[in-house]
Image (spheres, helix red, strand yellow):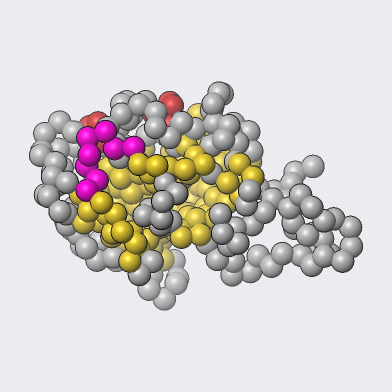
Amino acid sequence: MSGKQISYGVVYPGTTTGGGGGGGGGGAADLYNIALEDVNLSDGTWTLHDPDSLINGVTFVNGRNVITLNALASGSNAKYNWKNSGTKEKVPRWYKTAKIGTNDINREDLVTGIYSIDFDSTREASVDILAGLAKIADSNVTTGVNLGGAFGQISGQAFAGYGVYTFSSATFLSTGGPERGVISFQHGADRIGGGAAALLAADGTSNNSGVDRSSNQAHASNGRPMSLLIGLGLRNDNTPFDQGDQVIVGIKYLFIKPDLS
């Protein structure tokens, strides 16, 4: 990962973060206005799981991922919907090992994730976008993926929605044209955890409150390491895609693991 990410450990005045250092002389890491990490799905670090080839291609332009879709006919398409409590074998996702610096994030770690999702004004496809930590990223079932994190949605209507995703459902809100959703999620110590979302207007102020969701679902096994997962799915079952439809979305994230000793 890039230098934008924090290493691990609580930051104390006069000490350094991370596994080295300690003692005197080091300056505390400055966490004010810290940059989040861009998700660039075309940078070669991601594995794409897409059994039915819904993804035609992806590029990264002006800080956003331009995802081009292949055609999908209407019909019973629950298998492509992240908000379906059962099967997950067909829904597209990109994933890679979740890390803080050079350290893997494991299922027993208590980690705070900060996510930002922002769509441009393109409304060619009605889709959900997810970003979070997964136990088994390419699993065919919900209990295998065990995903928790951030959620965004667009449709043919005017506004985007943003919120929190846990396990197989999302809590989200669409207001009068929010610029982005910022989600803080506590990934917790062998559990999926939970979070809260703020929808931000163009001036950076929040135009909503009360968007939160949690899950006590246990990881129990696997998840060493966890995966950072970006998912794309249908907004609703039976929603078709036309060939060449595009979804243009910026995604950022930051993981922090405190020292609880």
Place of residue 21 in the rendered image (x, y in percent of width and height, measured from the top left): 82, 56
Location of the C terminus by quadrant is top right
Q: Quadrant of residue 93?
A: top left
198 vs 256, nearest the viewer: 256
Q: Is residue 114 visible?
A: yes
103 vs 75, nearest the viewer: 103
- Specify the segment rendered in magenta: 49-56
Q: Quick check: is 50 in the magenta stretch?
A: yes
Place of residue 121 in the rendered image (x, y in percent of width and height, measured from the top left): 24, 66
Q: Quick check: is 181 in the magenta stretch?
A: no
Q: Quadrant of residue 81?
A: top left
Place of residue 210 in the rendered image (x, y in percent of width and height, measured from the top left): 45, 53
Q: Is residue 178 visible?
A: no
Residue 94, above or below 173: above
Query: Image point 58% across, 51% down: which residue?
Result: 255
Location of the N terminus by quadrant is bottom right
Question: Is 223 left, or right, of 82 in this rendering?
Answer: right
Residue 158, above or below 81: below
Q: Quadrant of residue 60?
A: bottom left
Q: Which residue extends farthest top? A: 221
Residue 1, above or below 239: below
Place of residue 138 in the rendered image (x, y in percent of width and height, measured from the top left): 39, 32
Question: Is 221 left, or right, of 94 in this rendering?
Answer: right
Question: Is 157 left, or right, of 89 in this rendering?
Answer: left
Query: Image point 52% across, 48% down: which residue?
Result: 185
Query: What secondary structure predominates along the stretch shown in magenta?
Result: loop
Query: Image point 34% across, 37% down: which residue?
Result: 49
Q: Which residue extends farthest front? A: 44
